[in-house]
Image: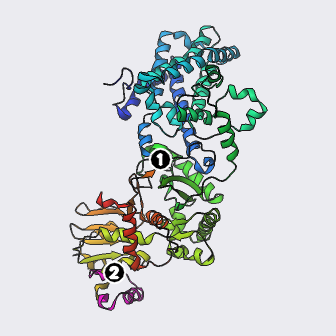
Amino acid sequence: MVAPLSAWPWENLGVFKYLLYGPLAAKVLYSWIYEDTIKDLWCLHILVICALRGFIHQLWSSYSTTLFLTRNRRIKQEGVDFKQIDREWDWDNFLILHALLAYMACLIFPSLDDLPLWNPKGFITLLFLHVTVSEPLYYWAHRYFHEGYLFTHYHSLHHSSSVTHPYTAGHATFLEHLILCVVIGIPMAGSIMMGYGSTSMVYGYVSAFDFLRCLGHSNVEVVPHEVFIKLPFLKYFLYTPTYHSLHHTEMGTNFCLFMPLFDAMGNTLSRNSWQLHKKISSDSAKNGRVPDFVFLAHGVDLTSSMHAPFVFRSFASVPFSTRIFLLPLLPVAFLVMLIMWAWSKTFLVSFYNLRGHLHQTWVVPRFGFQYFLPFAMEGINKRIEEAILRADRIGVKVISLAALNKNEALNGGGTLFVEKHPDLKVRVVHGNTLTAAVILNEIPKDVEEVFLTGATSKLGRAIALYLCRRRVRVLMLTLSTERFQKIQTEAPADCQNYLVQVTKYQAAQNCKTWIVGKWITPRQQSWAPSGTHFHQFVVPPILAFRRDCTYGDLAAMRLPDDVEGLGSCEYTMERGVVHACHAGGVVHQLEGWTHHEVGAIDVDRIDIVWKAALKHGLRPVSSM
C-alpha cells in the first residue's frame, strides 16, 4: 500500500500536469487583454518565479553535464544512467506544488499586491529567520526522514539516485516537498508579516535557495578549498557539493540544509568532509582517468546539436527526432556553430564504463554539411589529427572514427593519419569491418540476389566480395566499368560471375533485397518491387517513401547488458545502441588487437570481427 502523501496527485497526468498552471496564466491574460492592466500581479510573479527556478535547474544541469569543463571536478566518477534519468523525469513536480500554494496565499492575503519592490530590512529579517528557524527545522526534519518508516516510504526515493544531479534536488515525495514549502515559506512570511517584505526579497530568496540546492547536488566541486583556508569559519556557514555528496554516500552524516554548523552542533558532521573537499578541489588541475577507448564523433546538423546531454538531459536520453519546441533555439544553435567553426577544439561529450574500461565520446566541432565544403576539409583533418595525437599522448588504446570523420575523400578512411604518424601507440579504427558484418548478417541466408548502390565504395566493395563468395548474385550499380572490374578481379575466379555491373535502377525491378550505400530519391525507390527491404549504410538514412516496402536502420549494435553509466542516445539510435563503427572500436579495444583498422576492409576479417562482437556480448539490434 502506498504511504499517505508519498505520491504526487498529478503523477498520472504526464505532460498535462502543466495545465495546472492554467488558472494563473488565464488570470494574467484576462487582466492584460480585457482590463488593460494586470490586477493580480502576483499571478504573473508566480509564473515568472517558476520559470526562473526551472531555468536555474536547467543551467546547473547543463553545467554539471558539460564534461569538457567539469570532468576533473566530478566527485563521483560514475555516470547518470537511463534508470536514474527516468526516475527523475518529473523532478519539476515541486514547482507546480509551490506555485499552487503561493497562489492560495495570494488569495488569502490580497495585501501581497501592495509589497514594495525593495526593502533592505526585509533581507536582514529573512536571513535571520532562515538561520534561526529554517536551517534547524530542515536539519531535524531531515534526520527524522532517515529513520525507519519515514525513510523506507518517503526519503529512500531521493536516495535512489546513485549519482547526484541538479534534478536530484527536486526528486522527492509529495510530503517532503510540503515540508520544504514550510522551510522556504517561514522566512518570507515572517518578513512580510513584520512589514519588511518586498518583491525583490521573494525573487532573491527563492532563487538563492534553488541555486544552493542545485549546487549541493551538482556532483561537481566548484568551491575552491583555498577559501576555507583563508576564511576557516566559512566552512560552517556554506556547504559544498563534496559535503553533500558524503550525505548520499554515508547516509548518517551531513544532514544540514546549507550550513554545516548544524551538523557540527548535532554531532553528525562527517570527519571526511574537509579532507575530501580539499582533495577533489586540489585534483581539479590534474588530468583525470585516461579512457581506454574513444569514439570520435561529429555533429550532424543544427537541430541534432541540441541532442547533446549538456543541452537537455531528458531529450538526449531518447532517440533523436526533430521537436517543435527546439525550433526557436535554431538561431542560437547557428551562432554556436559559427563560434565553433571559428574557434574550437575537439571536446568530450559523454562516457560510460564497460567491464572496468572507460569509454568516451569526443566530438569534432563540425557539422555534416561542412565535410562537403572543399575549403573546410583541411581544417577538419587537422581537428581529427589533433584528437588522435592527443589520444596517443594521454595513453588511449583505441580511437574509432565516426561516419564522416573517416570519409574516403577526406583522409582515406584514416589512412592519412596512420601513414603520417607511423609510431602511433593508439590504434586508429574506422569500424567499417563490423559495419559490413552487421549489414551482411541482416540479409537472410536464402537470398540469391541483391541490388547494391554505392557499390564501389569501401563498404560496397566489401559487401559485394563477401556475398559473391556466398554465391549470391550482386547487381552493382556503378557507371565506372574500371572500378567495377577492379573489384571483380579481387573475387575468387569461380565467384567473379556473381558480380554484375548495372547502370540503371530499372535493373533491380525484380530484386527484393536492396543494399543502399548511396542516397536514393523516392523516384529511384519506385523501381523496387513491392515487398522490398532496404538495407542501408548511407548517412543520412533514405526517406521511407514506400509503404509496401520495409526499411532497415543504419548498421548498429546493442552494447552489453553490463554497461554502466550510459545515459544518452547516440543520435537516432535506441537506448544502449551505438553505430556499428562505434561498436567496432569497442570490440577492437576489448579484444586487445594491436593493428590499425584503416583503409580498405579486409573481407577475410568480417566473420572474425563479428564473432568477437558476439563473444563480448554485443548484439545485433535486428535480433531484439
The residue indicated by pointer 2 is 476
Residue 155 point in image, percent of width and height = 45, 27
Residue 21 point in image, percent of width and height = 43, 26
Amino acid tagged 2: Met
The residue indicated by pointer 1 is 327
- Residue 92 visible in this rendered orientation of the protein: no
The quadrant in which residue 425 appears is bottom right
Residue placed most toward the observer, 92 or 551: 92
Asked if residue 474 lies in the magenta stretch, the reply is yes
Residue placed most toward the observer, 81 or 593: 593
Relative to residue 565, is residue 60 drawn left or right? right
Residue at 41% across, 40% down: 86
Relative to residue 424, is residue 465 drawn left or right? left
- Residue 313 visible in this rendered orientation of the protein: yes
Task: Report the quarter where the C terminus lies.
Answer: bottom left
Viewer-side label of 2, 1: 2
Q: Secondary structure at mark 2?
A: strand
Q: Is residue 228 above or below residue 350?
A: above
Amino acid tagged 1: Leu
Q: What is the magenta range?
A: 468-496
Relative to residue 182, is residue 394 drawn left or right? right
Residue at 39% across, 79% down: 604
Asked if residue 239 lies in the magenta stretch, the reply is no
Asked if the residues shown at circle 2 and circle 1 are in contact, with their CB atoms under 8 angstroms apart, the answer is no
Q: Secondary structure at mark 1?
A: helix
Please, which colouring scheme is shown?
rainbow
Residue at 29% across, 76% down: 451
Q: CA distance from mark 2 to mark 1?
A: 40 Å
Residue 456 point in image, percent of width and height = 41, 80
Residue 289 point in image, percent of width and height = 60, 54
Sequence-wise, which precedes: disc 2 or disc 1? 1
